[in-house]
Image (spheres, coloured by chain):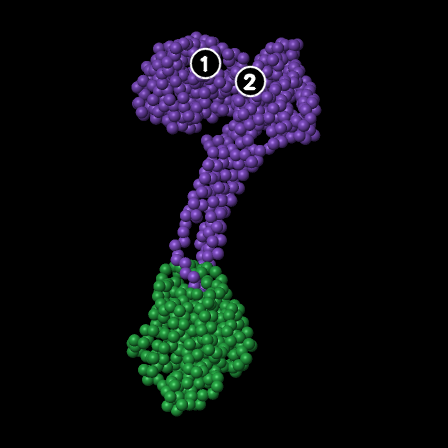
Chain colours: A purple, B green
């Protein structure tokens, strides 16, 4: 037997207390050798033999209760020696969208079965499937038949590729053992997301089995409305140009067709004109030999355009205070922060989005109105530049997202990078998201907040862009200004799409969060492409779910590059051993039985102590 | 039979009957003589008649008579030997049966320095009775028992027999367990002659068995006198605080709070005494309860009363 927290066994020394008390206790009754003791029968007397036995039982119960308590706190477990000896082979099969081409699926299963067969005799085998997240479909077992069955049942889905999830799940299975992780994948480069790395325990080797290059594929990467037109972006990963006929339906009704020629390894837009409608648009094409899951894309029509926006500056003069923002976005109107006394709720509620560039003169009433606008579902973009007071901003976001904004010292100019390229703001950048790294920040603000997610970080690691939930609304906080004062963001090509996507993301509270990628669906929404209804406290709304467009891009890496992102951890074995032991203890939960036994001993002691 | 009341007038001679005084005397023989002489002396002053052991008449000396009984004054006057004849001169065979079981060893704390244990009291009583019996020319024997007979001396009037009896008594030691009935039956079966049987015991045993054993003597034609000797503690249960009582014979231990058990105990001891008194009386067996803190004259008076009816 081992103990998870052996130091608690010291507490068993407390069991000496009742023992010492028992030994020290002296019966003070005088002893009288009497001839007529038998005449006391039937009187309320206590036979000393019975009393001694009762005292011994009480002593045993008290000592036992203390010992059991110490043992329970020490968290005992029976170590599985078998697991400690046998090595483990984890077969991790990529089941992302890019693996769903028929030929790729067959090849992946064959490689998986081969990995099971070639695992050393006596080794345990486990099977893990992964896309956005990893699932252990077969825990470590010596049953090769079960492993074979599990591999044969593997079926790709609609998720994106994330190798980090696969290694995290596989690594947890080793629990201090040695062995191998056999990764069966198409080596898609996007699987290492934004600089991801994976760590495996020391003594675990990583083998990569290449499922091969996906077949030439046609996919609809994007679907958007542009005035009275619907534009579907079609990608061709094949070498040859292909003529593609795309179809459009709105709420299931056929609306139009468009035929385009897509060059090899290129994209083309299919236009569907005269589409003034609201509802769910679905663009689809035929590609029987390619990845089936990316042949249809969905979009929610109506209200996607951000509409007009209110920009709060120091003077209200956008040409003076927000020239770049004014020209990057359409339909903006400027007001001075100091004029907040004249605002009414209706004034603010006419706008789906407020851009806060200055807090000078923004008094409490004004802050409360902005907070109310936000809580009711409005969107707020805050640029924490020189005209923004951190305390006032924190006051606006209030209890929803307590925020800290203060000036930060910058020795050298900082660059930023998205922390999550799948965020709706960065998703549309695609491969161009790296251009954000060209922006130089000479001065920044330190921003941090509960209920906020850092969706972009500076090279220093500090948050650059926060996405904060605030009541029914949402706020994006940028840790610098947007008027070319602390940084040169405004003169970079990425400025406009950043603002546009941010405005789209924050505006129209009824439609924000209307599009999701399979890996990011909220609770209650199926993780599969299509249309669904999301129920929230504010009501229900229709949402669409699409596959990650990056899965359709054949951007592969070599096995060496793949391996380079995997780091063996020297102390991971010990850590994993500890984790494994902790997991064993968690499964056995002997401490609960010991605690129950202790409670029983205490209750029994109470009953026996009352016996006369 | 109604017992005569003891004299309530403090008499100097009664001090010799006080157990506390007697206990300080040396040998058992001395104790016995002191008690008996003191008792007889008290009798002479007593208004009670009928228990005399004085000289009644003369008869002519017969060869074999005890020379100490020859009245030398009469011989001087008449030149012929005459022996004194006492009023109670009979050949009654008396058998003293003394309980020496473990329970007889009890001695209350009040009597720790003064007074006697039940065994010492019983031995002193037996010695006194033996002395008195011998003085009256009765044959006296001794049987000591615990759960079995540990010593037996047949009754006799031989010169020196009293001394042997006293030595036997002096050598007795307290035994272990009690079994009153079995030795009684054994003694009853072994008695060749009927006479007077005097049982000295605390009778802390099964009353049914004890009474049956005593009736066995009656069946054999003997008179029986029973002295139940108890310590004051056994009669009054004077304990105050919680006490661990250890049985003298079995070693059983109980812890009792006297306040909670006194009433129960006293009820049971009274029931036991009354049962003996009632059933022995109904059987025609004389019974006397003795308290080891009280003088022995009650016992001696009881003996004389019984003795007077024994032919």
Of A247 and A372, the residue lying toward us: A372
Task: Provide residue B61's location: percent of width, then percent of height.
Answer: 45, 88
| Crowding at mark 1 (Cα within 10 Å: few <14, some 14-19, many 20+) | some
Q: Residue at coordinates 37% horizontally, 63% vertically from top-left?
A: B112
| Relative height, residue A66 to residue B261 (above, below) | above
Give the chain letter at badge 2.
A
Task: Provide residue B98's location: percent of width, then percent of height.
Answer: 47, 72
Q: Is residue B276 visible?
A: no
Of B11 and A512, the residue lying toward us: B11
Q: Residue at coordinates 42% horizontally, 82% vertically from top-left?
A: B68
Quarter of the N terminus of chain A within the rendering: top right
Q: Quadrant of residue A519?
A: top right
SS at mark 1?
Answer: loop
Task: Provide residue B177's location: percent of width, then percent of height.
Answer: 50, 65
Q: Is residue A89 visible?
A: yes
Cα–Cα span, label 2 and label 1: 22 Å
Q: Quadrant of residue A590?
A: top right
Number of marks in the rendered image: 2
Mark 1 = which residue?
A459
Q: Residue at coordinates 47% horizontally, 26% vertically from top-left?
A: A510
Q: Are marks 2 and 1 in contact (CB under 8 Å)?
A: no
- The image's mark for residue A113 is none
Q: Quadrant of residue A414?
A: top left
Please name which of the two marks, 2 or 1, marks the residue nearer to the observer.
2
Task: Provide residue A471's location: percent of width, then percent of height.
Answer: 42, 28
Q: Is residue A66 left or right of residue A163?
A: left
Give the chain letter at badge 1.
A
Mark 2 = which residue?
A567
SS at mark 2?
Answer: strand
């Amino acid at each position: 037997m081992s103990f998870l927290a052996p130091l608690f066994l010291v507490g068993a020394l407390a069991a000496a207390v009742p023992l010492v008390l028992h030994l020290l206790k002296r019966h003070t009754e005088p002893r009288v050798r009497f001839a007529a003791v038998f005449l006391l029968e039937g009187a309320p007397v206590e036979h000393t033999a019975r009393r001694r036995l009762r005292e011994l039982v009480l002593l045993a119960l008290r000592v036992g209760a203390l010992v059991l308590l110490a043992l329970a706190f020490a968290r005992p477990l029976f170590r599985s020696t078998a697991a400690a000896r046998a090595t483990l082979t984890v077969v991790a099969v990529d089941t992302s969208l890019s693996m769903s081409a028929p030929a790729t699926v067959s090849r992946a299963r064959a490689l998986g079965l081969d990995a099971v067969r070639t695992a050393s005799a006596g080794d345990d085998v486990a099977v893990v499937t992964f896309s956005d997240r990893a699932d252990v479909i077969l825990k470590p077992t010596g049953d090769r038949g079960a492993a074979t069955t599990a591999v044969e049942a593997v079926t790709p889905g609609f998720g994106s590729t994330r190798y980090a999830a696969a290694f995290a799940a596989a690594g947890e299975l080793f629990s201090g053992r040695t062995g191998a992780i056999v990764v069966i994948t198409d080596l898609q480069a996007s699987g290492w997301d934004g600089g991801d790395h994976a760590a495996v325990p020391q003594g675990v080797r990583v083998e990569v089995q290449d499922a091969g290059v996906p077949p030439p594929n046609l996919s609809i990467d994007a679907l958007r409305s542009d005035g009275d037109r619907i534009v579907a972006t079609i990608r061709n990963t094949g070498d040859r140009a292909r003529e593609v006929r795309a179809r459009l339906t709105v709420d299931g009704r056929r609306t139009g067709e468009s035929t385009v020629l897509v060059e090899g390894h290129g994209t083309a837009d299919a236009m569907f004109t005269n589409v003034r409608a609201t509802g769910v648009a679905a663009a689809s094409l035929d590609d029987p030999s390619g990845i089936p899951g990316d042949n249809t894309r969905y979009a929610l029509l109506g209200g996607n355009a951000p509409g007009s926006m209110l920009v709060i500056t120091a003077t209200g003069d956008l040409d003076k205070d927000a020239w770049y923002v004014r020209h990057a976005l359409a339909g903006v109107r400027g007001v001075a922060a100091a004029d907040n006394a004249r605002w009414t709720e209706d004034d603010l509620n006419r706008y789906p989005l407020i851009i806060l560039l200055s807090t000078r003169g923004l008094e409490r009433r004004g802050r409360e109105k902005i907070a109310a606008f936000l809580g009711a579902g409005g969107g707020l973009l805050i640029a924490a530049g020189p005209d923004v007071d951190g305390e006032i901003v924190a006051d606006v976001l209030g209890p929803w997202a307590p925020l800290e904004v203060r000036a930060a010292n910058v020795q050298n100019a900082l660059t930023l990078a998205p922390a999550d390229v799948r965020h709706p703001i960065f998703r549309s950048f695609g491969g161009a998201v790296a251009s954000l790294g060209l922006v130089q920040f000479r001065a920044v603000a330190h921003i941090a907040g509960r209920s906020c997610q850092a969706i972009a970080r500076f090279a220093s690691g500090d948050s650059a862009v926060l996405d904060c939930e605030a009541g029914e609304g949402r706020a994006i906080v940028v840790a610098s200004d947007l008027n070319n004062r602390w940084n040169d963001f405004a003169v970079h090509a990425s400025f406009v799409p950043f603002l546009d996507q941010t405005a789209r993301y924050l505006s129209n509270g009824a439609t924000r969060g209307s599009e999701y990628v399979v890996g990011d669906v909220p609770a209650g929404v199926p993780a599969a492409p299509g249309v669904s209804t999301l129920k929230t406290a504010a009501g229900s709304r229709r949402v669409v779910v699409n596959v990650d467009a990056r899965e359709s891009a054949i951007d592969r890496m070599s096995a060496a590059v793949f391996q380079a992102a995997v780091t063996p951890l020297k102390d991971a074995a010990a850590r994993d051993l500890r984790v494994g032991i902790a997991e064993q203890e968690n499964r056995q939960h002997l401490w609960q039985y010991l605690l129950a036994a202790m409670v029983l001993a205490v209750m029994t002691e109470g009953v026996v102590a009352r016996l006369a | 039979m109604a017992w005569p009341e003891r004299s309530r007038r403090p008499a100097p001679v009664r001090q010799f009957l006080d157990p506390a005084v007697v206990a300080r005397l040396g040998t058992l023989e001395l104790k016995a003589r002191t008690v008996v002489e003191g008792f007889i002396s008290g009798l002479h002053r007593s208004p009670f008649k009928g228990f005399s052991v004085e000289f009644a008449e003369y008869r002519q000396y017969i060869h074999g008579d005890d020379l100490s009984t020859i009245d030398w004054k009469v011989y001087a006057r008449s030149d012929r030997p005459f022996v004194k004849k006492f009023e109670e001169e009979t050949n009654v065979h008396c058998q003293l049966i003394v309980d020496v079981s473990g329970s007889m060893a009890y001695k209350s704390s009040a009597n720790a320095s003064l007074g006697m244990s039940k065994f010492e009291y019983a031995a002193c009583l037996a010695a006194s009775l033996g002395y008195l019996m011998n003085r009256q020319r009765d044959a006296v024997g001794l049987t000591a028992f615990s759960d079995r007979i540990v010593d037996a001396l047949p009754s006799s009037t031989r010169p020196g027999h009293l001394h042997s009896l006293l030595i036997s008594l002096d050598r007795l030691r307290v035994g272990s367990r009690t079994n009153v009935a079995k030795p009684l039956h054994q003694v009853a079966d072994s008695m060749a002659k009927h006479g007077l049987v005097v049982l000295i015991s605390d009778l802390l045993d099964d009353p049914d068995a004890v009474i049956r054993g005593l009736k066995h003597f009656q069946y054999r034609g003997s008179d029986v006198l029973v002295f139940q000797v108890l310590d004051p503690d056994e009669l009054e249960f004077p304990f105050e605080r919680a006490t661990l009582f250890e049985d003298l014979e079995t070693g059983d231990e109980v812890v009792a709070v006297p306040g909670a058990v006194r009433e129960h105990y006293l009820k049971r001891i009274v029931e036991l005494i009354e049962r003996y008194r009632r059933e022995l009386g109904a059987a025609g067996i004389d019974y006397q309860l003795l308290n080891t803190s009280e003088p022995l004259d009650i016992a001696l008076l009881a003996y004389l009363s019984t003795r007077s009816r024994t032919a």
